[in-house]
Image (cartoon, rainbow, N blue to C red):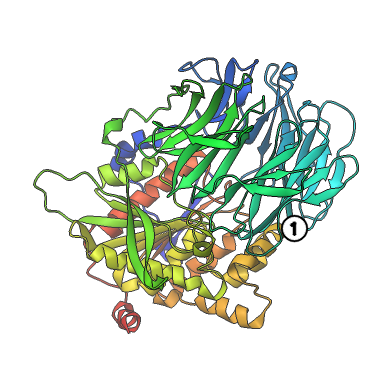
């Protein structure tokens, strides 16, 4: 091992090749690292107070907020972050459940917590993966999903947290099953059975008899999700792309055994659904080109209206007040951290409950992205296909003719979508480093219809990489951008995209940052956790088929590592159950064996991404140092020995 690649440990971090962080980076970055955000958990005390999740210390915990703008009082104090808080509907019990794992291993356990005496206990076995804990309306039973039977399939269990009764297995399934909602008489539960992003089904399960009834149509081209019971249990609201490009809002009539499409006029995916306690209104959001639009549906007439004059952002965690006249939610803006708001549905007045800090920065300096579309290599309906992207450009200095370096940020998934929420790191790049950021939603992204979603499946995997090549072409045509200084960055599947882009466009990129990325599809499918394997085979291809295995090997970054001659930063969590650390290590070795430069950062107490503040702060500093050295400065006078030869091969 060369001196440059020697390992050193900093807390729970293992560092290779990363120089000491200069003090000036610590100074300029500190404020950006101390921004916070808050998300809604739910209402307590008959709706007088809110529980929110936010981070004051090392990890995200639950806090109590007594009134709009009041101090956030921390009520949980765990070293690991908490997820999926759900408040018991029986307010007299003062209980909530949450999920917690250990070191990012995603073997989530369900815990019961008392809001007043601060006592808690684990409800699940401590070994399996558990989730989706849903209280019944009486507040005495929880339904959840668990892999405890065989470590692969997700079954449905009932838990009775305030009695000595053992958990009850109520449905044993194959693959991924999870509960959504109880009928209001607590006799039925809606379940989702997820095969892939393009194929999913909604069922209703009778708790006592075990009767299971499918509500949605069959077909590998139909994805149906959610499942919210109407107040009188006569019907179920769900989303589906049945006979449509987008997931529409549908209503299933129990007696007539048919469904009606309710949102035909909204040609975007319908996402979050939340029914008011009195059953009169269903709140839902539509994902309109990456921005949320909030709607209210009258359940008696099935007519809906858009709530106007709300800030353009991302709307999640819709939670109704017990009086059914107020709707709590989390709103995340591109220029402001996520915060908790409450909407009065009669006056449509929006009241802000939390005011998350931005580290003392001037929020007026934060920059909104512009939605752009750039042409790619193929056509759709005999027209040029365009790829959407969010384009962040630094504010120009008066009379300056400088060209900005560019960071291409590629989201993970691939069944995901970049949406312009607040990123303090993006704002640092823009305001402190004068780096333009472009976040494309390449083919295979969600949010643009199911046919766009399928454009990268199987043998078409590298078509999404070609989209990045066309984005680089677009960059060369922009007078304000410096096409000689372009970097790529992404996590998970976005990490694969970074590695593949570095191999395909080595001569056009300065450097790359791969975060928990797939480096070889065959080894990834072999080593990812068993409960994920079949789900990933649907997307990437089945490596057990010899022809597909050959294809996956051919396109894998480890196979093409010899083409990468530009510097890489590789970031990984040791406990990652999705993309194991072996994926990062084999890519690191392949690059170094070829004489390339690669920095490596491994966190021993993290999984699929860094969630603890100390780790994330060091990671952020390493990224900035890397960009300063390899993106912002002039190229080194001693290029990689194979750079010229490989550049010629790529251009051919």
Q: Measuring from the top left, give residue 477's x and y in whole percent.
A: 22, 65
Residue that appears at 31% across and 79% down: 647
Residue that badge 1 annotates: 175
Q: Position of residue 421 (x, y in %)?
A: 42, 42
> Is 609 or 330 nearer to us in this picture?
330
Q: Is residue 125 left or right of residue 405?
A: right
In this rendering, the answer to whether 601 lies above or below 520 is above
Tell which of 254 and 186 is nearer to you: 254
Q: Nearer the viewer, residue 44 or 604?
A: 44
Residue sitting farthest toward the left: 399
Give left or right: position of 556 versus 129. Answer: left
Establish if 648 lies above or below 162: below
What is the x, y in percent for residue 596? Answer: 39, 70
Residue at horizontal 38%, vertical 66%?
A: 468
The quarter holding residue 190 reads top right
Can residue 63 be seen here? The reply is no
């Amino acid at each position: 091992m060369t001196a440059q690649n020697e390992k050193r440990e900093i807390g729970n971090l293992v560092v290779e090749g990363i120089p000491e962080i200069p003090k000036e980076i610590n100074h300029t970055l500190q404020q950006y690292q101390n921004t916070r955000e808050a998300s809604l958990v739910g209402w307590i005390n008959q709706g007088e107070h809110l529980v929110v999740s936010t981070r004051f210390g090392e990890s995200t915990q639950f806090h109590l907020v007594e009134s709009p703008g009041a101090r956030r009082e921390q009520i949980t104090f765990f070293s690991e972050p908490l997820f999926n808080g759900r408040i018991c509907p029986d307010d007299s019990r003062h209980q909530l459940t949450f999920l917690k794992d250990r070191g990012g291993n995603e073997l989530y356990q369900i815990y019961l917590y008392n809001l007043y005496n601060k006592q808690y206990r684990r409800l699940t076995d401590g070994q399996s993966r558990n989730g989706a804990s849903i209280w019944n309306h009486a507040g005495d039973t929880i339904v959840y999903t668990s892999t405890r039977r065989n470590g692969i399939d997700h079954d449905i269990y009932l838990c009775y947290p305030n009695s000595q009764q053992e958990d009850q297995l109520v449905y044993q399934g194959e693959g991924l099953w999870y509960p959504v909602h109880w009928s209001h008489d607590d006799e039925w539960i809606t379940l989702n059975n997820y095969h892939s992003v393009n194929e999913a089904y909604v069922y209703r399960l009778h708790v006592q008899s075990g009767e299971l009834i499918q509500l949605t149509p069959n077909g590998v081209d139909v994805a149906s999700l959610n499942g919210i019971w109407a107040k009188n249990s006569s019907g179920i609201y769900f989303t589906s792309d049945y006979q449509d490009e987008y997931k529409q809002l549908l209503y299933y009539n129990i007696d007539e055994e048919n469904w009606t499409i309710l949102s035909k006029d909204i040609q975007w995916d319908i996402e979050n659904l939340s029914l008011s306690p009195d059953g009169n209104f269903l709140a839902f959001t539509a994902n309109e080109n990456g921005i949320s639009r909030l709607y209210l549906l009258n359940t008696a007439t099935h007519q809906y209206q858009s709530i106007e004059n709300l800030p353009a952002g991302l709307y999640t965690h819709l939670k109704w007040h017990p009086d059914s006249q107020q709707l709590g939610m989390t709103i995340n803006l591109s220029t402001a951290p996520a915060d908790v708001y409450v909407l009065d549905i009669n006056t449509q007045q929006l009241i802000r409950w939390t005011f998350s800090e931005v580290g003392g920065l001037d929020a007026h300096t934060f920059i909104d992205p512009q939605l752009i579309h750039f042409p790619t290599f193929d056509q759709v309906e005999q027209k040029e296909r365009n790829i959407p992207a969010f384009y962040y450009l630094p504010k120009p200095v008066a009379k300056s003719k400088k060209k900005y370096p560019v960071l291409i940020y590629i989201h993970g998934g691939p069944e995901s979508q970049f949406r312009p929420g607040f990123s303090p790191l993006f704002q640092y790049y823009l305001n402190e480093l004068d780096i333009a950021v472009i976040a494309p939603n390449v083919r295979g992204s969600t949010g643009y219809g199911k046919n766009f979603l399928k454009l990268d499946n199987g043998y078409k995997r590298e078509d999404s990489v070609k989209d990045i090549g066309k984005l680089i072409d677009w960059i060369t045509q922009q007078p304000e951008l410096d096409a000689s200084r372009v970097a790529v960055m992404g996590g998970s599947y976005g990490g694969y995209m970074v590695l593949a882009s570095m191999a395909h466009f080595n001569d056009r990129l300065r450097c790359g940052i791969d975060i928990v990325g797939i480096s070889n599809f065959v080894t990834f499918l072999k080593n990812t956790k068993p409960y994920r394997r079949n789900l990933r085979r649907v997307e990437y291809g089945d490596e057990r088929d010899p022809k597909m295995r050959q294809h996956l090997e051919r396109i894998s970054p480890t196979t093409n590592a010899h083409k990468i001659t530009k510097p890489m930063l590789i970031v990984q969590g040791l406990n990652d159950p999705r993309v194991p650390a072996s994926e990062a290590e084999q890519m690191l070795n392949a690059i170094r064996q070829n004489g390339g430069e690669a920095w490596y950062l491994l966190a021993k107490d993290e999984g699929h991404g860094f969630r603890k503040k100390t780790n994330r702060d060091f990671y952020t500093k390493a990224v900035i140092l890397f960009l300063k050295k390899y993106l912002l400065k002039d190229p080194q006078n001693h290029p990689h020995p194979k750079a010229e030869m490989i550049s010629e091969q790529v251009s051919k």
